[in-house]
Structures are given as structure tokens and as C-alpha cells.
Image: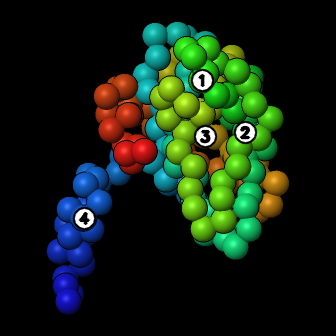
Amino acid sequence: MIRHPGLMLVAALALTGCHPARGGHAQVGDIAVAHAVIPASASATETSAFMVLNNHGARDVALIGASSPQADSVQIHQSIGGLMEPVASLRVPAGGYTILGPGSYHLMIEGLHHPVAIGDTLQITLEFDHGGPVTVSVPVLNYTDAVSELPMR
């Protein structure tokens, strides 16, 4: 049994193949957000956000909306065949998780009030049909670092 907290962290990281997280984390009740990141974008008015939504509860929940005081709108999008389409909700299974990442589901942040750069942080509030809301501070990272924050699918 490992008793030293630092060794426990090293062991956990070795087992998961991850590095210490730089992404945002938050939890309200059974809903936890992990690895929340925004890849730096060339656009001054829009960007996307990636994260992992964990549901520690006994019933499914759905992400039904999102907002940020730093943008006009935040929509749930899905990438299909290279095109992005808004979706009304996103299921997070009971006792499971859903990954929002490149080429899949993600949050589309539009109408940024100010351009964002590496090192900035945006506040995003996630709305769920059961539980929440959950507000998370989401750092802007370069694309490679942002994507490396996400667990393998």
C-alpha cells in the first residue's frame, strides 16, 4: 500500500497514462467537469471548448445548455463529416462520462467580447436537466496542449 500522497499521485498518473491536469475542474453534486480547455483560436470572435463530463449519479443526465459572461452564446455542437451542427442536448450516462473533443461533440463559443489568447481563462456555466448548474474556469491553451488534456477515447 502506498502511504505517501505524492507517491499516490505518481502511481495514479502512471496507471492512467495522464499528466497532471492543466484544464479546469468543477463539481456540483453528482456532476463533475474535468480537463476543461479551450484551444487557442485564430478567430477573434469564436472558439471551442473541450472537456470531460462525469456523472457519478444513478441516472442519466443531459447537458442542455451553456453560457459565458465573456461571450454572446455558447452552443453544444457535433462535428459530422467535417461540418458542425448544433444539438439540443448531450447525454451523460449514469455512472459514466462523455468526452467533448475535436471532431466530436464540443462547445462552440461565439461572439467573444474580447479575443482570447493562451493563458486567458473563460468562465463557462453548464446547464443540466438534473443537477447543476456547474460553472468551470476554462484555460486557453495551445491546441496541442489542449487536446493532450483529454483522455483517450
Residue at horizontal 66%, vertical 65%?
A: 94
Viewer-proximal residue, 98 or 25? 98
Q: Secondary structure at mark 2?
A: strand
2 or 1: tag closer to the N-terminus: 2
Residue 123: mark: 3
Q: Is residue 58 left or right of residue 40?
A: right
Which amino acid type is marked by label 3?
Answer: Gln
Between label 2 and label 1, give the one nearer the viewer. 1
**Mark 2 or mark 4, whichever is nearer to me:** 4
Which x, y percent locates residue 77?
A: 67, 28
Rate crowding at label 1 as few (under 14), some (14 to 19) or many (20 or more) other CA atoms within 10 Å: some
Quadrant of residue 65 in the image?
top right
| Mark 2 or mark 4: whose residue is earlier in sequence | 4
Q: Residue 66, which numbered label?
A: 2
> Of the residues shown, which amino acid type is indicated by label 1?
Ser
Q: Is residue 25 above or below residue 7?
A: above
- Mark 4 or 3 closer to N-term? 4
Quadrant in the picture for the N terminus: bottom left
Q: Which residue is mark 1?
A: 79
Residue identifier under label 4: 15
In the rendered image, residue 127, in percent from the top left (x then y), is placed at: 76, 48
| Residue 9 versus residue 123 in the image, above or below | below
